[in-house]
Amino acid sequence: MRITRDPAEVRAALRGAERPLGLVPTMGALHAGHLELLARARSECRTVAASVFVNPLQFGPNEDFERYPRAFDSDLAALRAAGVDVVYAPDVATMYPPGFATTIDPGPVADGYEGALRPGHFRGVATVCVKLFATVCPDRAYFGAKDAQQVAVLRRVVADLDLPLELVVVPTVREPDGLALSSRNVYLDAEQRGAAPAIHRALDAIIRAVRAGETDRERAVARGRAELSPALREAYLDVVDPETFAATGEIRPPALAIASAWLGTTRLIDNEPIEPGAALQGERA
Ligand code: AMP
């Protein structure tokens, strides 16, 4: 496994690499969710590259950039075990040298929900991903469904900028109690950890309501809200179009139930798709 902090070295290492070439972008602190992306890339691609970069451009001034978990040595062991060929782990000064000024504005899909709570977040995500794509030139890039708005933003960016790669979206990996794996779960104390699965239960309640025939967004969301305990503070709970992240009055699948809640100073996110035909399955809520 080749490990480098230098984009020119990445290009050299991948010149003539066997295709398809898959890229798995990460911020490190790898968990089983990341491993799922790596396994999928390894199963579909002849060459696999992974990046490890905690991207300051996607963190707000009062967010957790400084304390975001970093575990480079164990990440490298996990990447090696996953069969990664090339690891790109640039320094901040390499990614954003003095004078750096060009960023990608992904438009309205980035405005609501995560974009509203984290102004500039998706500009940071889009910019770093386009830079990673330009350095690695992958045929496929692998992202987690857990960060659904990130996927919607990147789909827009890839389409709008004619980037010659395919986005592959990997289903969310969860703890047995439903909590989506996240590098931020380490911030939770025991009580918060106990309360956290309510986020996923809220999404499940929305899905059950739709399956039972509910088409009104507000009523479906209210069913989800009833699952949230006082230990959680809702940041948002809604049903949106998975492509545009616009909420509509009537739920018309395919749609996406999305949730975010604060546990103390930690905010977690999750989502579940509402598939076409969901309302026809006749399940009781
Ligand atoms: P991060 O390191 O948090 O930026 O995540 C890197 C990639 O892993 C992103 O595409 C995430 O969506 C994905 N990811 C994070 N958590 C999970 C999870 N629980 N299941 C699947 N993919 C995930």
Image: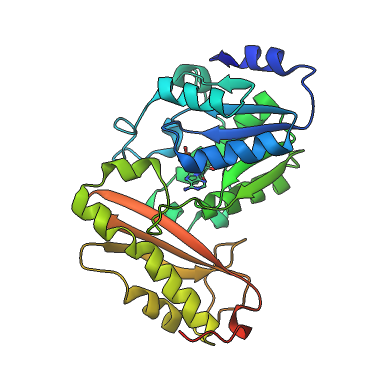
Point out residue 104 in the picture as x, y percentages from the top left corner.
58, 39
206 vs 248, nearest the viewer: 206
Point out residue 78 in the picture as x, y percentages from the top left corner.
49, 27
The residue shown at (21%, 47%) is 189
Q: Quadrant of the C terminus?
A: bottom left
Instruction: Indicate left or right for 218 with 169 as reference.
Output: left
The colour style of the image is rainbow
Q: Quadrant of the N terminus?
A: top right
Point out residue 92 in the picture as x, y percentages from the top left corner.
45, 21
Q: Is residue 52 above or below residue 113?
A: above
Q: Is residue 282 above or below residue 166?
A: below
Is residue 235 visible to us here?
no
How many numbered discs, if any? 0
Q: Is residue 182 above or below residue 8?
A: below
The residue shown at (54%, 81%) is 211
Instruction: Indicate left or right for 62 with 147 as reference.
Output: left
Point out residue 177 in the picture as x, y percentages from the top left corner.
37, 59
The residue shown at (59%, 36%) is 38
Is residue 193 visible to us here?
yes
The residue shown at (61%, 29%) is 132
Picture quadrant where residue 58 is located? top left
Instruction: Indicate left or right for 133 with 89 as reference.
Output: right
